[in-house]
Structures are given as C-alpha cells and as structure tokens.
Image (cartoon, rainbow, N blue to C red):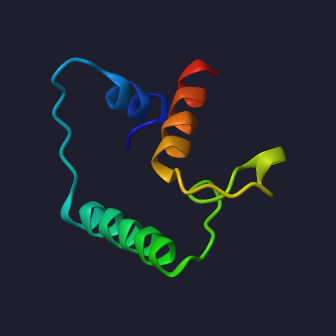
Amino acid sequence: MLKISQVVAIAVSDSSVKVEFSESTREGIKASSDWVMDNRNTGTDSYRVTIGFGATSHRRTKQGVSLIRELIRLTKSS
C-alpha cells in the first residue's frame, strides 16, 4: 500500500513513473470518480471537490480541479 507522501511524489514528479493498480483498486477508483462526476453534474456539493475544506468549507467553487491540485500542493509542503 502506498503512503500519501508516495502518492504526492508520483503526482508531482516530472520523471516517468509507472504505477500499476490491481483490478479491485481500479474498480474502486472508477466508482469514486463516477460518484464525484455524478454529484458535480447534478449540482450536489462535495467536500473538497466543489466546496472548500476546513475553515473554508462554506465556500463554493466551480474550479474543482484547481481545488484538488491545491490539496496536493498543501500535502506536499507539509
């Protein structure tokens, strides 16, 4: 199992890193992605996807990708 720090390192790496997931992991990732997209498409707010987090959880955004990138950046710097 990967640690969060390893996932972040892979996500922000400029090198060519190959990661392979088991079939059950891929199915879980797909289910999670489908859930996020379904909620986004129906206008349902999702914590850390369409709304802020922590002290900013009351704020809404249509910039979900940017919000997720910021989470990765914050995780990397901590």
Q: Compared with residue 28, is residue 70 higher up or lower down, i.e. above or below?
A: above
x and y, in percent, of residue 77 in the image: 59, 19
Which residue sits at x=77%, y=54%? 57
Q: Compared with residue 22, is residue 13 higher up or lower down, i.e. above or below?
A: above
x and y, in percent, of residue 53 in the image: 72, 49
Closest to the observer, 56 or 60: 60
Residue 31 as seen in the image, left or right of residue 54: left
Residue 71 as seen in the image, left or right of residue 52: left
Residue lying furthest right in this view?
55
Closest to the observer, 6 or 61: 61
> Could you tell me which quadrant the N terminus lies in?
top left
Residue lying furthest front in this view?
62
Which residue sits at x=44%, y=74%? 35
x and y, in percent, of residue 66 in the image: 50, 42
x and y, in percent, of residue 46 in the image: 61, 66
Which residue sits at x=38%, y=65%? 33
> Could you tell me which quadrant the C terminus lies in?
top right
Q: Compared with residue 50, is residue 70 higher up or lower down, i.e. above or below?
A: above
Residue 16 as seen in the image, left or right of residue 56: left
Count of numbered marks: 0
Q: Compared with residue 6, is residue 32 higher up or lower down, i.e. above or below?
A: below
> Which quadrant of the view contains residue 41?
bottom left
Closest to the observer, 30 or 2: 30
Which residue sits at x=75%, y=54%? 59
